[in-house]
Amino acid sequence: MDEGEERDLIVRAKSDPEAFGELYRRYVGRIYNYHYRHTGNPTEAEDLTSRTFFRALRSINSYRDKGASFQAWLFRIAHNLVVNWYRDTSRHPSVALDNAPPLHSPVQAPHEYVEAQEERAYWLQMLAGLPEDRKTLLILKFVEQMSNMEIAAVMGKSEGAIKALYHRTLISLRDMIPEGWPDEV
Amino acid sequence: MKSRAQRYIVLQESMPAEEEQVVGQVVVRTLPPVAPPAAFVEQLGSDLVAEARRHYDVEQRRHRVTRTVGWVGGGVLSVVGGVALWMFVQRKRGVTPGVPSPSTAVFPAQA
């Protein structure tokens, strides 16, 4: 679906329930993934996902297509809920490995699979230990492939602040990467 | 010792593009997309559409009520404003509303 079609869909979604349902189907996977990556818990991710969409439904009339894209607007709602979740629960999030999809291909040898799992567990631990804003930045940048401008809109910061945060985050992650990665971990 | 002018403050350490790419690979490999359960997507979808129907009905009703109140209120205000304006104009002319003005009063002829 191109931008023009999506714009039409958003306009229709302000008064047509089916159009809102279509928007929901377009974004539910990404919003769920975003919440899951923060909470590490499928039940919490489902709860936050439904709250995101119900909140979006209540305020879709206030959405204006000026500057920030619809996905940035929707992710901003999701982000605000995640921030509240961190504040309310004061928990240290971690990703539930048991629920993560297997990384090995059918042709992967067992020892390679074990190595890949160990490597992933190491990085999950590293990423889970990052502050919320850095984790959000990494998810939006690398998983959601958003531009700095969109990330700034989602996180409610200036583009310059996002660039600085991105840089600091990369430096700190680079220092965690063992030498020779990704060949040997 | 360097003079004051020769001292530099390093604001940001530069990072080569290849290293940035490696960090990106780490993140993408570590956080592959996780799809929500199909039953959850289906259930939430139908709940949302039902809620959207209710929401839009309420919105439409509110708009109708607002419009009706606006029309009625506007009509009443127009009448009140018109009367007030008429009274104001009459007062300016020195005429007391409801009492025939002296110029138009009919006096009985003297016998």
Image (cartoon, coloured by chain):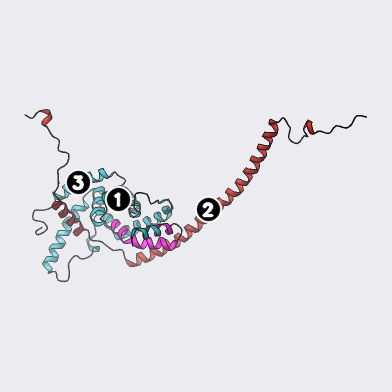
Chain colours: A cyan, B red
Q: Confirm whether circles 2 and 1 share one chain.
A: no
Q: Which residue carries the number 1 mark? A: A150
In the rendered structure, the answer to whether residue B15 lies left or right of residue B42 reads left
Q: Which residue carries the number 3 mark? A: A167
Q: Which residue carries the number 2 mark? A: B63
In this view, the residue farthest toward the left is B1
Label 3, secondary structure: give it.
Answer: helix
**Where is residue A18 shown, x and y percent of the image?**
43, 63
**Where is residue A20 shown, x and y percent of the image?**
41, 60
Report in which chain the residue with disc 3 lies.
A
Amino acid type at mark 1? Glu
User: Distance between the Cα atoms at labels 2 and 1?
Assistant: 34 Å
- Which region shows up in magenta? A9-36
Residue A112 visible in the current orientation: yes
Report in which chain the residue with disc 1 lies.
A
Amino acid type at mark 2? His
User: Distance between the Cα atoms at labels 2 and 3?
Assistant: 49 Å
In the depicted structure, whether residue B78 falls above or below residue A5 = above
